């Protein structure tokens, strides 16, 4: 395992990147395929740490899954009955929120005794609002150690009905209940209390559910209705579009340094909200072109920006790095859920940005960043957070070298990230 990687000054970026499949789509489609009768072939599937835990969990309860990593293809033979696992079982899910949260609801559909737990960080990430909502619908779920957090025991009993869900922490809680709800006998109505965060991820969930034969009624993201007693229908073959969050680092690099970078795999027809990052780049001053299945960015003079990033918390981290190369103060607002991600990202970003010379102010749900007068070469702590590693790799565009500690944390979503970055980089000799 690589303990650190030093990136020497990058003078220019230029080239094309073929994006890996979206993590959010890959794990959702994998789960939906397992809930559908028959075989589903998933192409451009993302093989990463997060999807590995979902695959292992499904295999552990008896699913037949064939993986072809060379062709980025996975084949799933689905059957919702396999989630009715009558034996007592424990499933480890690392720090994969996109596996942990949906599986809580799915295992609650049947009389089970399933222990779900993760690594130290996963066991510090809250699931209270999801568990409370499922309990309203009849689920029996017990906390094993700390109230509101994994590990938990899921004992079944969820039957739908009127559900109230606090939406301020994670959209994954709503995704979890939405995916499970068609499979109960009763209709399910979900009322969102507080304001729902990361709404574009709910759009992804609803669009994918539709592809698998289930419609969701959505009224302004505060009321959802799903008819019960339904079955998911496999589309037989599904192609996963490129990961828009991963694209942001390469597009940002072009905006910071130039020449021109093209990412293939996302575009005008993408179902991911993070493709709106291209609008942020344009607003900050970059030159952008968006095609049906690609995006191109070239450098222009960058200006600071003030943004509510509640809908796009992942690429908000990339905006924080763009702030270092922009004129003036950048303010990123309404990002409280940064604090319950892979690490407390507001605190982590603040600490590491200060190391490289930025002037930073952090609040409960915001961060303000003024660029450094002179960039400082240093070691960047990643807090086992893949996005910290990928974001801070771009500091090498300042013509100062940067060392990323624990670079292997990118395996969570983008194992070949550094290889791809280096492929478009011209380094200072």
Image (cartoon, rainbow, N blue to C red):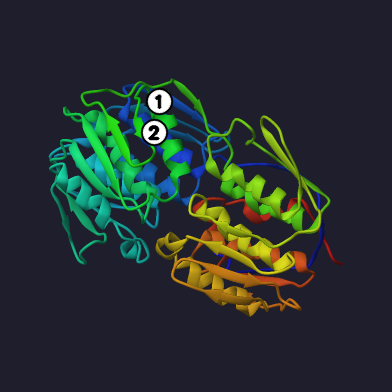
Q: Is residue 191 left or right of residue 75?
A: left
Identity of the residue drawn at 61% across and 78% down: 354
- Circle 1 packing at 10 Å, graded few (<14), some (14-19), many (20+), is some
Where on the picture, by quarter, is residue 202?
top left
Residue 406 point in image, percent of width and height: 55, 68
Which element is circle 2 on? Answer: strand
Q: Residue at x 63, y 36 (%)?
A: 266
From the viewer's side, name the closer residue of 425 and 74. Answer: 425
Q: Residues within 10 Å of mark 2 (few under 14, many from 20)?
A: some
In this rendering, position of residue 118 left or right of residue 276:
left
Q: Position of residue 211 (x, y in %)?
A: 43, 24
Q: Who's the residue at 48% across and 72% down the image?
A: 363
Q: Which mark is residue 210?
A: 1
Callout 1 secondary element: helix
Q: Which mark is residue 265?
A: none
Q: Provide residue 156's location: percent of width, then percent of height.
A: 15, 42
Q: Is residue 320 left or right of residue 81?
A: right
Verify CB contact (< 8 Å) between mark 1 and mark 2.
no
Corner quadrant of residue 243: top right
Mark 1 or 2, nearer chain start:
2
The quadrant of the rendering that contains the N terminus is: bottom right
Q: Quadrant of the C terminus?
A: bottom right
Return the residue at label 2.
65
Q: Rounded to the nearest whole Å, what is the CA distance between mark 1 and mark 2?
A: 23 Å
What's the residue at 25%, 23% (across, down)? 230
């Amino acid at each position: 395992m690589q303990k650190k990687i030093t990136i020497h000054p990058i003078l220019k970026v230029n080239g094309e990147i073929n994006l890996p499949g979206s993590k959010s789509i890959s794990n959702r489609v994998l789960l939906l395929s397992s809930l559908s009768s028959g075989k589903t072939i998933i192409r451009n599937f993302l093989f990463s740490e997060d999807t590995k835990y979902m695959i292992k969990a499904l295999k552990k309860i008896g699913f037949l899954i064939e993986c072809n990593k060379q062709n980025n293809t996975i084949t799933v033979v689905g059957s919702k009955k396999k989630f009715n696992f009558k034996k007592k079982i424990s499933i480890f899910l690392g720090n994969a929120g996109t596996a942990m949260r949906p599986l809580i609801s799915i295992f609650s559909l049947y009389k089970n005794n399933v222990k779900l737990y993760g690594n130290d960080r996963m066991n510090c990430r809250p699931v209270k609002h999801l568990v409370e909502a499922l309990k309203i619908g009849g689920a029996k779920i017990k906390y094993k150690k700390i109230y509101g957090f994994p590990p938990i025991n899921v004992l079944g009993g969820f039957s739908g009905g009127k559900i109230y869900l606090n939406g301020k922490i994670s959209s994954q809680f709503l995704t979890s209940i939405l995916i499970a709800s068609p499979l109960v006998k009763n209709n399910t109505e979900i009322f969102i209390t507080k304001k729902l965060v990361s709404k574009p991820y709910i759009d992804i969930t609803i669009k994918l559910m539709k592809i698998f034969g289930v419609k969701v009624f959505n009224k302004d993201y505060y009321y959802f209705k799903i008819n019960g007693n339904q079955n998911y229908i496999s589309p037989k073959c599904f192609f996963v579009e490129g990961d828009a969050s991963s694209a942001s680092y390469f597009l940002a690099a072009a905006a910071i340094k130039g020449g021109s970078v093209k990412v293939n795999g996302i575009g005008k027809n993408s179902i991911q909200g993070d493709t709106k990052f291209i609008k942020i780049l344009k607003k900050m001053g970059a030159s952008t072109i968006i095609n049906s299945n690609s995006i191109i960015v070239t450098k222009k003079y960058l200006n600071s920006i003030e943004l509510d990033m509640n809908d796009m918390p992942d690429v908000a981290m990339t905006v924080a790095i763009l702030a270092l190369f922009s004129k003036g103060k950048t303010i990123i607002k309404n990002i409280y859920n940064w604090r319950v991600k892979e690490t407390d990202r507001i605190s982590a970003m603040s600490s590491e940005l200060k190391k490289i010379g930025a002037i930073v102010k952090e609040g409960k749900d915001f961060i303000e960043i003024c660029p450094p007068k002179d960039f400082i070469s240093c070691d960047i702590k990643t807090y086992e957070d893949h996005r910290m590693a990928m974001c801070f790799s771009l500091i090498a565009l300042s013509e100062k070298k940067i060392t990323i500690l624990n670079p292997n944390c990118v395996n969570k979503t983008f194992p070949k990230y550094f290889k791809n970055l280096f492929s478009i980089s011209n380094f200072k000799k």
